[in-house]
Image (cartoon, rainbow, N blue to C red):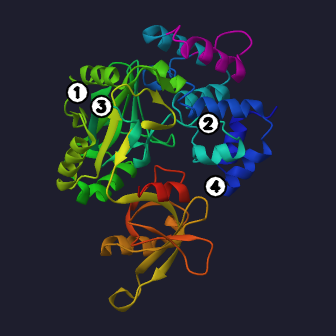
Amino acid sequence: MIKMIKIIDELNLENGSNYKKEVLTKHKDNELLQRVLKMTYDRVTFTYGITMKNVDIESQTIIDGEPLNLSQMLDSLEDYYCTRQLTGNAAIEGLSTLLSQAREEDAKVLEMIINRDLRINLGKTHINKVFKNLIVKPPYMRCSLADKLDRITYPAIVQTKADGSYRSLIIDNGEVTLMGRSGEQDDFPMFFNKVSTLPDGVYIGELLIRSLPGAKNRMKANGLINSDVEQEDMFLQTWDYLTLQEWNEKKSIQDYWDRLVLLEQNIKNCPNEIELIEGKIVNSYEEAMEFYKVQTNKGLEGAVLKNLDTPFKDHTSPTQIKLKEEAVSEVIITGYQEGEGRLVGTLGAMYYVSSDGLVEGKMGGFNDETRKEIWDNQEKYSDTIVSVKYNGVTKAKGKDTFALMFANFVEFRPEKDEADNLKYIQDALK
């Protein structure tokens, strides 16, 4: 069988994603390759509770006897590290011993797996296109829209709709992972160091930057966060907490109120890095909308209304409702139109389409800085997802498709890998 390091080297002969997918397709029947990819990038299924930073690689000496092969080493990871049979210093010593018992090229692959990076410059979405559903996406509980308001029972809790970039902060025996909705991960060492002492579990919220507060700074702040440039004043505004077991099982049967109480207790020693989102117990829809209006008057996005007994599940929750007077949905960029008058030579409008192809048209609403950025980097933004604000959906003349009324650009959504369809876009207005 071809050595794993050779396949990794082959993937790096060219940088294009199409080339890399061709290489993966060529090795599609290689079960060990699938296992290596999954154990590296699937943080939902596999957690190890250890990093390479404390392992003394230089002092390792090969133990006499037949070297362990890569499959045997992966078995050890699953049997002893994923199950937490080895933790702390015992885990560090055990990993050092394990690496010393392997050939150099296999030890190198194991180190990359522990570091969660095979250095092949290929995202999880592309891997899953070749190996369907190989990399499990992290659980995400979406909000329902106003048509589910009859499912709310009072008293309920209403909370600010955060203006940041969605993240799940995973703490596992001091090991920190910060993960977006599609499973992409950030590397923010200063932030990680500050939150590493939090109790184990998953803290769900949105990353923000204190020096760039409010909706008017949202695009700039999220742009900095999603560019992987660490900001000293970034923090997580959080609204939910799961144990590691609940995260792995993608569900929690605990009432939301109980999770919220535990969350508040867990974060009290990290007030600058992680804070509880603003919320209020309400006894009616009218009270919830009063809270909503206070938040929007501050320039924030809105509010979310939740039942106090809402369980967590990887789905669209019927008891967690977005409160909005204006609709925002996600669409795919398909093309560009040059401006006229003073806008000649730059972006005038941008064409979009929904995920099912039933909603299409063009949007405006760009400031000059954004116009220039998009116009100068058209290839970069084509086929990517953006948020668009609108106040109606109308049937396009002479077509079987629909269009958004008064469609205006809101922001880029690099953390998303799926746009909305016609039904969602229509329901968002209800």
Query: Circle 1 is placed at which residue position?
Result: 270
Instruction: For marks 3 and 1, give the CA distance.
Output: 32 Å
Instruction: For marks 4 and 1, give the CA distance.
Output: 40 Å
Image position, residue 302 (x, y; %): 28, 50
Q: Is residue 39 visible?
A: yes
At mark 4, the secondary structure is: helix
Task: Between residue 164 and residue 426, name the one nearer to us.
Answer: 426
Query: Which quadrant, please, contains the N terminus?
Result: top right
At x 50%, y 61%, the residue is 331
At mark 3, the secondary structure is: loop
Query: Circle 4 is placed at which residue position?
Result: 17
At x 51%, y 20%, the residue is 48
Instruction: For marks 4 and 2, give the CA distance.
Output: 17 Å
Q: Which residues are magenta?
A: 61-86
Find out whether the residues at labels 3 and 4 contact each other: C-beta distance under 8 Å: no
Query: Circle 2 is placed at which residue position?
Result: 135
User: Neighbour class for label 4 at 10 Å: few (<14), some, many (≥20)?
Assistant: some
| Residue 340 position (above or below residue 29) | below
